[in-house]
Structure formats: C-alpha cells, structure tokens
Image: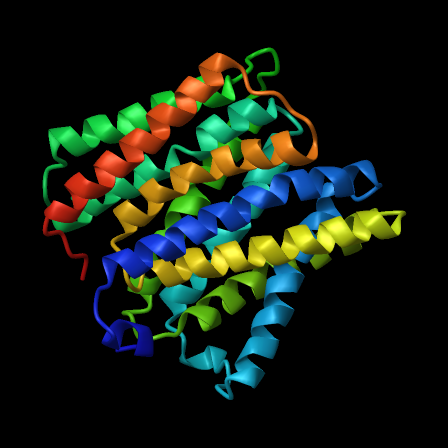
Amino acid sequence: MSQLESLGRHPRLGALFSLCAAVSIGITPSFSKYAYQEGADVLFVLLLDGLVPMVALWVYAIIIKQPLNIKEIPIRAVILSSIALIFTAYGALYAITFISPNLMIVILYTFPMMVFFTIAFLTKKRPSLKLTLIYLTVFIGLILTVGPQFNMLHPLGLILAVVGAIGSACMYFVDYAANHKIQTHRLVFVGSVSVTILTLILIIITGDYQTPYSVSGWVFLIAAELFYALGIFLIFLSVAFLRPDLGSLIMNIEPFVAIGTAYLLLGDVLLPLQWAGVCVVIGAVSLGGILAHKENIELD
C-alpha cells in the first residue's frame, strides 16, 4: 500500500486535487497559443510535454529523498502510464491540424463518460440512470459552451481526438494498474519519459522542430508546460483519494477555465448561449458529485 493510499479515501481532498488539476490544465491553452504565435511548433511543444514533467519530478524525487526506482513499477502500470500521456498529448495536439479545436475539445471530453462506463464494467454494476443523465447533461452543456464547428472534418482528426480521449481516460486507472503501491510522481515520471523518447525519435527522423523566437514566447511556453505538468500530476494524485468517475467528472470544468483564461488574456468574448452552457455544466457536475458520492463503488 502506498503512502497516499495508507491515508485512506478522502473524497474532499481528491475533489480539491481534481479541481486544481482542471484549473492548472485549463490555463495552458492560452499560454501555448501565444507561444505558437511566437514561433513554437507542435513537435517542440510535445517534447516539452514530456521533458518538463520528467525533469520537475526528478528534482522533486531528489528533494523528498526518495529515488524513482523505475524497475519496481509493475509493467502494466508502465504501459498504461505511457499510453495515457502519449495518447493524450499526441491525440489532442495533432487532432487540431485536421479538425476545428472546438470539435476536438468536444470529442476529447467524452473521456469522463469512458471512465464512468469503464468503472461500471469493472465493478459489474449497472450505471445508475441518474448519474448517466448527469454525464449526458454535462456533455450537452459542454457542446453549448464550446460550439463545435463541422466545417473542418477529417477522419484522421476524428481518430486522433478519440485517441486523446482514450489517453485521458487511462490516466484514471494507472494507480490501480500499480495496485496502489507506487507513488504518484513515479508513475507520472515513467509516462513523461515515454513521451520524451518518442518525440526525440520523431525529431531525429524528421529533423524539423521550431522553438519560440522571442523571450516572451519562451516564458509563456515554459509557464504552460509547468501548469500542464502540475495538472497531470494532480490528476494521477487525485485517484489515490477519489474514485476515478468522480475525478473525471470534475475535470469537465477544465474547458471553461480555458475559455475564461482566453477571455481574460486574449480578449475572447462569450456569447449568452455559452454562458448558459457554463451554468449547465457547473450545476450538473455539482449535482453529479453529490449523487455519485452516495453510491458505494470501490475499484480493487
């Protein structure tokens, strides 16, 4: 049993971690958008998606004086952690080169429902009608807010967005794949190493990547990566305290944080229908958390 697991289930603490993860990751798109405008390309951003968390967690392990000991991590946890981070990063970032960003977000955020129904399958319990309706309501609210555009439709883009959703869902099961015995930072470190290695291979093969050409571009890119690394760490950490379905439900807040950040930093404007969607999602997530907390579901 890990140190975190030995503390027992603390739903409120887990919910706080999930909410902080949603805020942290929600901040990154606006920062990354500015870095793109300053010359950075997708491949270089992907490299930092792996490299920054890897270095940060290595330093963290030194500070807390606990070696990473990758060899102790079960192979299935290594594989699932790698799949989670590679699928999420590559799927989301490359999907928007084929389909609109809004449509990518809608497809990506089918992952909470993937987690919800996976929990039902693994526990062999039929999903409650109330919670199923809550998840559907949240998804409808997301569609109202984001407003997916279908003028850019490409099969590869749709597939990549689904791959990103699968990767996001996998994050919530890595701790279980490790039998709750491996500390969170070690699991995230393994996945980050996989992302870094894969991206370095692609850079060597293509021989092409672009870095920001201004100091401000670098500052915003590094800030985006640090927020991203913190968000991923908090997602993995939340599962030690909170059921995966509840954690993923709370993550539906992330797109609205992204929209709010874009509104504050980039001057984007929200339409009345989008504000209605925000209210629907926040209300449904709150109600869903109350209903789901009453159900006794444990995934062993």
Q: Residue furthest top?
A: 151
Q: Nearer the viewer, residue 1 or 16?
A: 16
Q: Position of residue 58 (x, y in %)?
A: 59, 76
Colour scheme? rainbow
Residue 269 image point, x, y percent = 61, 20
Residue at horizontal 30%, vertical 30%?
Answer: 283
Asked whether 287 or 42 is in front, the reply is: 287
> Does the image show residue 49?
no
Q: Residue at x 35, y 59 (%)?
A: 238
Q: What residue is at 69 percent from the left and 43 percent from the top?
A: 32
Residue 270 % position (x, y): 56, 20
Q: Residue furthest right?
A: 213
Q: Is residue 288 above or below residue 57?
A: above
Question: Where is residue 172 drawn, in percent x and y?
Answer: 35, 53
Residue 37 against residue 49 in the figure, above or below: above
What quarter of the picture does the N terminus occupy?
bottom left
Q: Is residue 276 left or right of residue 289?
A: right
Count numbered badges in the picture: 0
Q: Is residue 215 above or below residue 256?
A: below
Any part of residue 295 in sight: yes
Residue at image location 24% in from the left, 77% down from the top: 6
Along the viewing direction, whichever of 118 and 218 lies nearer the viewer: 218
Left or right of 110 on screen, residue 164? right
Q: 58 above or below 216?
A: below
